[in-house]
Amino acid sequence: MARKTTITKDEFAAILSAYDLGTLRSFRPIAAGTVETNVLLKTERGRCVFRYYENRNREMALFETHLIRFLKARHYPCPAVLKDRRGQYVGIFRRKPFAIFEFAEGRHVAHPSSRQRRQLIEKVAELHKTTRGYRPPYMKYRMNYSVELCRRLAQRAAKRLGTTTARRKREWIERELAALDLPKSLPMGICHADFHFSNVLYKHGRFNALLDFDDANYTYLLFDLWGLVEYAAWHWQDDRVLNTRKARRVLREYARHRPLNRAERSHFFDVYKLGILFDAIWYFARGSADDFFEKRKIEYLNRMGRERFRRKLLGGGKGCT
């Protein structure tokens, strides 16, 4: 967990003096979130959320605020970002960027019902339809998930650790990346890339808002679909079992709102493996070079093969039927 910054009441008052939000009445840190500092502010004009980017530069924060403004203009359910009196959406405090967002009502549900899961899948598909082909300003400052980025990160991680195990892991990741087939016909756009329950709000049992676009980036739209299937269908007690029945359920629901094209149906296997390889980067120090979590998952998928994977999860027809 990243180290969080403590901000005093006087400092918040000074920050808010640049906004038309009224006088600060109280503030409370929000426990959810492991990277950035989020604080609930109460002013005489209502509630809002202060987001302090602990590990992002100004350009990365601007990517997020531009994206959210794009989404809000198209009525996508996420909290709006608020501008100060100068029309700026990102400020600087102690040499780090911050933004202030409207407060979204609702609660986080650690174990959503099947109906609530379907609503989330629908809103993910809506996000993808809305942002397909959209390339926000400051996009180059984000980690846009690709084979090239994964390779660079693996090389960087191996160099940082400087061990034989790290070198062998890097070599394995590079071999697996070289085996991927990701044609240019795969649709690209904005993926949220983090559907942890703390980033989803339900109000009266219904989906109300998607929060925290801190990991959002321009990549294959299938990347978010990988995340949805992972959460719903991978058998974590046995890391070599994918529950294809649950996976098909996710894919069918998604296709009701955004049908997959031929290339996506044929190459979801490759994007799925790319997602696992990124996990191997995030947890690079875990396990030995010969036996670690992500390697076991990739080996399971390689034994299944692309065509069998497609048949089991997507069938032979159009969309996910």
Image (cartoon, grey):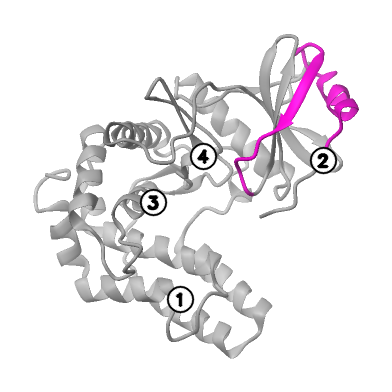
- Find numbered disc 3 in the image and state the secondary structure of the residue it sits on: helix
**Mark 1 against mark 3, which lies toward the viewer?**
3
Tell me if residue 296 comes above or below residue 57 in the rendering: below
Report x, y in % for residue 45: 71, 9
Q: What residue type is labelled 4?
A: Ser
Residue under label 1? 173
Tell me if residue 172 comes above or below residue 233 in the rendering: below
Report x, y in % for residue 16: 81, 21
Q: What stretch is highlighted in magenta?
A: 7-34
Q: In this view, does 138 lie to the left or right of 118?
A: right
Question: Of the residues under marks 3 and 2, which one precedes in the sequence?
Answer: 2
Residue under label 2? 6
Report x, y in % for residue 178: 39, 75
Cα gap from disc 1 to disc 4, whole angstroms? 30 Å
Residue most toward the left? 317
Residue under label 3? 227
Q: Which dot marks residue 198? A: 4
Q: Quadrant of the N terminus?
A: bottom right
Q: Which amino acid does label 1 sit on?
A: Ile
Around disc 4, counting alpha carbons within 10 Å, would you say few (fewer than 14), some (14 to 19), or many (20 or more)? some
Cα gap from disc 3 to disc 4, whole angstroms? 15 Å
Cα gap from disc 3 to disc 2, whole angstroms? 33 Å
Question: Of the residues under marks 3 and 4, which one precedes in the sequence?
Answer: 4
- Find numbered disc 1 in the image and state the secondary structure of the residue it sits on: helix
- Find numbered disc 4 in the image and state the secondary structure of the residue it sits on: helix
